[in-house]
Image (cartoon, rainbow, N blue to C red):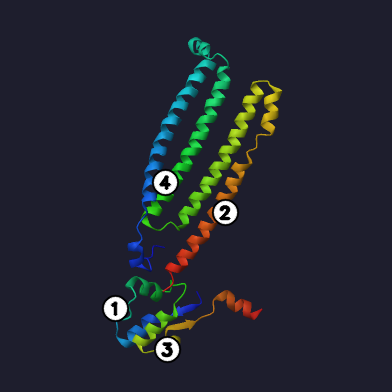
Amino acid sequence: MNVETLYPDEMATSKASPAIGFLNILLTIIWWGGWVFLGLFTLLSAYAGLGILGVDAVHKSFENITPFMALVSSVSVVIVAAVFLVIVKQLRAICKTLVTGDPFVPQNATRLRRIWVAVAAGEILRLCSTFVISRLSQSTEEISVVATDLRIYVWFMVLALIILAEVFREGARLRQEAKLTV
Amino acid sequence: MSIRVNLDRVLLDRRMSLTELSDRIGITLANLSILKTGKARAVRFSTLSALCRELNCQPADLLVYEPEEDEHIKAAE
C-alpha cells in the first residue's frame, strides 16, 4: 500500500549522510570491478575447457596442474564472483533506500534474506569445489584439510544476516503500522 | 477490522468537506483519507480529540465496534 508519510516535514529534513553517498560510489566501483573479474575468469574457464578438448597449444600451457583442475578452479571462482555480484546488487538496492530516507521497507528484509542465502550457497559451493580439487590432486593430506575447512566465521556471519533480515522485517512492519496511525 | 469509522457520515451531517476538516485540525488530507476509508491501524487520542472538537461530537459518534464473522463464532463456542 502506498501511503503518504505521516511526518512529511521530518522526512524532508532527514537527508542522507555523506557516508552513504561514499558507500554508494564504492559499491558502484565494486559492482563494475566484479563484472570485470567475472569476465576474466569466464575467459580462463573457456581457455581451460579448450585444454580439456585437446587443443595442444593450450594443453601445454598448463605446467603444474591438469586442464581439468584448472577448469574446476576457474569455474568455482566464477561461481564465487557471481555470488559476490548478487550480494553487491542487493547492497546497492539497500543503499538506494537509505539515500531516499526510508530503509525500513519490506523489500530490504527480502534483500537481506537473498544476501544470507547467497553467502551460504557460496560457502557450500566453495567447500564442494575444494573437495573436488583435493580429490583430483590425489593427496590424502589435502583431503584431511577439506574435512577441517569449515569456516565457522562465515556461518556465524550467515546467522548474523538471518537475524538482521528478521529485524528489518519487523522494522518494516512497525514502520507500516506507524504510517497507518493517524 | 472490527472497528468502523463513521467519519463520512458525521461530515455529511455537519456539511463539512474532508479538505475543510483537514485545514481545521492540521492533519494531512492523505491521513484523513486513511482514517475515512478504514485503512488506519490506530488513532492517536490527540487526533480523536481534535476531530471531536471540530466536529462537535463524541468518540462514539466516529467509531463503531462491529464484531467480525469469526468473532461471532468464537463467542458462540
What amino acid is found at the position of numbered circle 3 in the picture?
Gln
Q: Distance between the residues labelled 3 and 2?
A: 45 Å
Residue at the image position 32 percent from the left and 73 percent from the top: B29
Circles 3 and 2 on the same chain = no
What amino acid is found at the position of numbered circle 4 in the picture?
Arg
Q: Which residue, as the protein is rendered here, is positioned at the far front?
A: A18
B44 horizontally vs A13: left or right: right
Rendered location of residue B16, percent (x, y): 30, 83
Disc 4 versus disc 1: nearer the observer: 4
For disc 4, the neighbor class at 10 Å (few under 14, some 14 to 19, many from 20) is some
Q: Distance between the residues labelled 4 and 2?
A: 20 Å
Residue at mark 4: chain: A
Q: Mark 3 points at which residue?
A: B58
Residue at the image position 28 percent from the left and 80 percent from the top: B20
Q: Residue B23's mark?
A: 1
Q: How far apart are marks 1 and 2 (CA)?
A: 44 Å
What amino acid is found at the position of numbered circle 1 in the picture?
Asp
Q: Name the residue under label 4.
A: A92
Q: Distance between the residues labelled 4 and 3?
A: 50 Å
Rendered location of residue A115, percent (x, y): 51, 45
Q: Mark 2 points at which residue?
A: A163
Q: Mark 1: which secondary structure?
A: helix
Rendered location of residue A11, percent (x, y): 36, 63
Q: Distance between the residues labelled 4 and 1?
A: 40 Å
Q: Which of marks 4 and 2 is nearer the N terminus?
A: 4
Circles 1 and 3 on the same chain = yes
Disc 4 versus disc 3: nearer the observer: 4
Q: Mark 2: which secondary structure?
A: helix
Q: Mark 3: which secondary structure?
A: loop
Q: Quadrant location of the C terminus of chain B?
A: bottom right
